[in-house]
Image (cartoon, grey):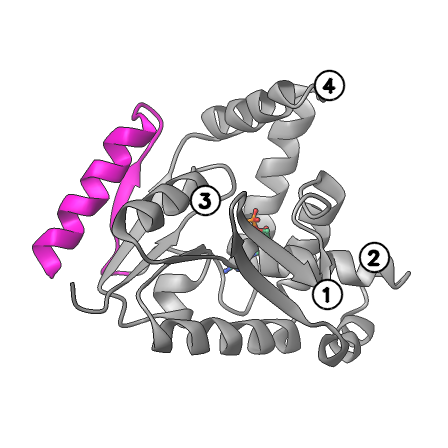
């Protein structure tokens, strides 16, 4: 198969990472979870005791953050300055910090550069908010995944439930709405559908159906 790249963008909870993981597995290529990279910057700022609302402080911290994605038997793991932070980045505080630091130019420049380096080298499925618009404007296939806010909040609710964590669905819904707003309204690289992306509303679709649809779209383009 010749080299290809799939860009998957969309709001929080639309199913991007679950789908991107399965796709990469089936297609035998690497998967880059760019949200995990922004989350690692947010976590790095919190761990340093910085106020992540302070753009200058977070920008100055960037050269000291070494963020690496590595494949392992348990799936992809993310390392921040040599420590595996794959679990630690998955909480609401880090999600809110990630959404904030993602509005800073210096943060985006650094992360976009490393994302582009990876995609130049190999076939990739990359998911995020600005992949089709900024990181890989020439991607073989661009997908924009959506789902209703209620469905996305419910999916997050079930993920927490499965981990035995008690959360309030109304609070989760509010957090998702706030994060969507921040991600869509920021000045640099806001979340938006690239003109040439295929939009898939996943509200009433199973993961298998979505994966099949994307693979058939990729086959058409190759
Ligand atoms: O996909 P996620 O929920 O793990 O992403 C966390 C935050 O990172 C999200 O609210 C916005 C930001 N992000 C971004 O700005 N650009 C990306 N390519 C990926 C994530």
x%, y% of residue 195?
26, 60
Name the side, left or right, on which 213 lies relative to 88: left
In which quadrant of the rendered view does residue 158 lie? top right
Question: Nearer the viewer's eye, disc 1 or disc 3?
Answer: 1
Q: Earlier in the sequence, mark 1 or mark 3?
A: 3
Up/down of 169 relative to 94, above or below = above
Q: Which residues are magenta?
A: 195-222
Q: Is residue 216 magenta?
A: yes
Label 3 SS: helix
Q: Is residue 41 magenta?
A: no
Dot 2 crowding, Cα within 10 Å, few <14, some 14–19, many 20+: some
**Mark 2 and mark 1: span between their CA atoms?**
17 Å
Ligand 1 lies in quarter: bottom right
Tell me the residue that label 2 is attached to. 46
The label number, if any, that marks residue 166 in the structure image? 4
**Mark 1 and mark 3: span between their CA atoms?**
23 Å
Asked if labels 3 and 2 touch by Cβ distance under 8 angstroms, the answer is: no
Tell me the residue that label 1 is attached to. 82
Q: Earlier in the sequence, mark 1 or mark 4?
A: 1
**Mark 4 and mark 2: span between their CA atoms?**
24 Å
């Amino acid at each position: 198969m010749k080299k290809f790249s799939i860009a998957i963008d969309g709001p929080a909870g639309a199913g991007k990472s679950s789908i991107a993981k399965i796709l990469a597995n089936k297609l035998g290529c690497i998967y880059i979870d760019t949200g995990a990279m922004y989350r690692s910057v947010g976590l790095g700022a919190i761990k340093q005791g910085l106020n992540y609302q302070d753009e200058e402080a977070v920008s100055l911290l960037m050269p000291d953050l070494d963020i690496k994605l590595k494949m392992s038997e348990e799936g992809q793991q993310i390392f921040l300055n040599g420590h595996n932070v794959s679990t630690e980045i998955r909480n609401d505080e880090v999600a809110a910090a990630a959404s904030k630091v993602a509005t800073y130019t210096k943060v985006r420049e650094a992360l976009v550069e490393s994302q582009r380096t990876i995609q130049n080298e190999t076939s990739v499925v990359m998911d995020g908010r600005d992949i089709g618009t900024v990181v890989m404007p020439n991607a073989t296939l661009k997908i924009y995944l959506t789902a209703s806010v209620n469905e996305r909040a419910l999916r997050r609710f079930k993920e927490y439930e499965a981990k035995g964590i008690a959360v309030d669905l109304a609070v989760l819904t509010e957090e998702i709405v706030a994060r969507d707003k921040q991600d869509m309204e920021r000045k640099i690289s806001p979340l938006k559908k690239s003109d040439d992306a295929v939009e898939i509303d996943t509200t009433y679709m199973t993961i298998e159906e979505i994966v099949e649809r994307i693979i058939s779209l990729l086959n058409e383009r190759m």
